[in-house]
Amino acid sequence: MIHKNEIFQIAKSLGLLPSTIEKDYVLGWILMGIQSHNSCNKSWIFKGGTCLKKCFFKQYRFSEDLDFSLKNQFHLDQMGLKIILQEIAEWIYEKSGIEIPVKNISIEFYENPQRLLSIRGKLSYLGPIMQKRRNNLPTIKLDLSIHEKICLLQEKRNIYYPYSDKPLVLPKALTYCYEEMFAEKLRALAERARPRDLYDVVFLYKNKHLVKSDSKFLQAVKEKSAFKKIPIPKLEVIKKHQQKDILISEWENMLKHQLSNLRPFDYYWRQLPLVFNWINNLFEKKKNLKI
């Protein structure tokens, strides 16, 4: 395990809270633990903001949880999942010295807004900052989607790990491809309109050169929208979204602790016409359907 001074130095250089950096450090080890476990590394597909941070972009907002889509249904056993997480916790302690108390590992099965079964796990940890603390430990959430629409082939990607206790051999992570990641974020923006969704969509658009296949991206946009029973995202709908006022008011609260320099909400909002003009043009070129 790295010394707490390394956490403090990185936090100071980025102008962020040490707790944000410590959580990122622990997230990296949990991700490596999952990818090193034979029950997970071929069937847990990494996605979401932490995936973008750990596997696609070194310079990206920090994140706070781990999101996966499950390819197989054999994980639908609360005790079995808990055993897997306990084994991952033991691996992490052996390799890094980070303690994830087994007694605090929790698994919850619940219905999502579409009334589909989902799984939420919670792991607490003793990281470098406060090794002697035993109460009110910081936590990391695991979201495991069982019924998510997976449209495209997955990829094995390198894990970006910037800390000094980097293992000699890093496992690769099974992830969504860029096209599916982008489509998923676009769907999330249209559906729930949270600050991180707007940030992510604009960031992904600015790196649209990573979209290797326009047709696969459009396919994923259509299929994910249909699966959630929502229209293909439109600029006009997002502008009138019922959550827009909350999106504006929560902009800094939700993102400021994740970024060294957060631009104001208006900057990202002004980028949306460019995003949707680009998507419209892709649909028109493919003579498929227009947004």
Image (cartoon, rainbow, N blue to C red):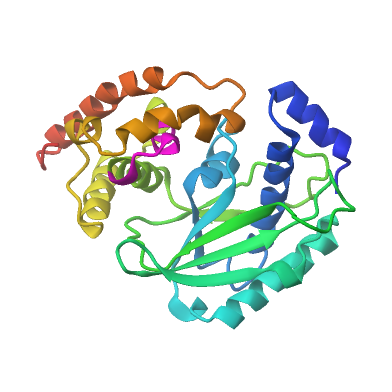
Q: Nearer the viewer, residue 167 or 25?
A: 25
Q: Which residues are magenta?
A: 191-202
Q: Nearer the viewer, residue 114 or 153?
A: 114
Q: Is residue 74 magenta?
A: no
Find residue 232 and report its image quarter: top left
| Residue 265 seen in render | yes
Q: Position of residue 184 (x, y in %)?
A: 35, 47
Is 94 situated above or below 190? below
| Residue 208 seen in render | no
Q: Quadrant of the C terminus?
A: top left
Q: Position of residue 227 (x, y in %)?
A: 24, 59
Q: In the image, is 167 to the left or to the right of 158?
A: right
Q: In the image, is 114 to the left or to the right of 255?
A: left
Q: Position of residue 250 (x, y in %)?
A: 45, 32
Identity of the residue drawn at 90% across and 53% down? 132
In this rendering, the count of numbered labels is 0
Identity of the residue drawn at 51% across and 27% down? 252
Prevailing SS of the magenta stretch: helix
Find residue 50 and report its image quarter: top right
Q: Position of residue 248 (x, y in %)?
A: 38, 28
Q: In the image, is 199 to the left or to the right of 91?
A: left
Q: Nearer the viewer, residue 289 or 227?
A: 227
Identity of the residue drawn at 89% across and 41% down? 3
Q: Is residue 201 magenta?
A: yes
Identity of the residue drawn at 27% across and 53% down? 224
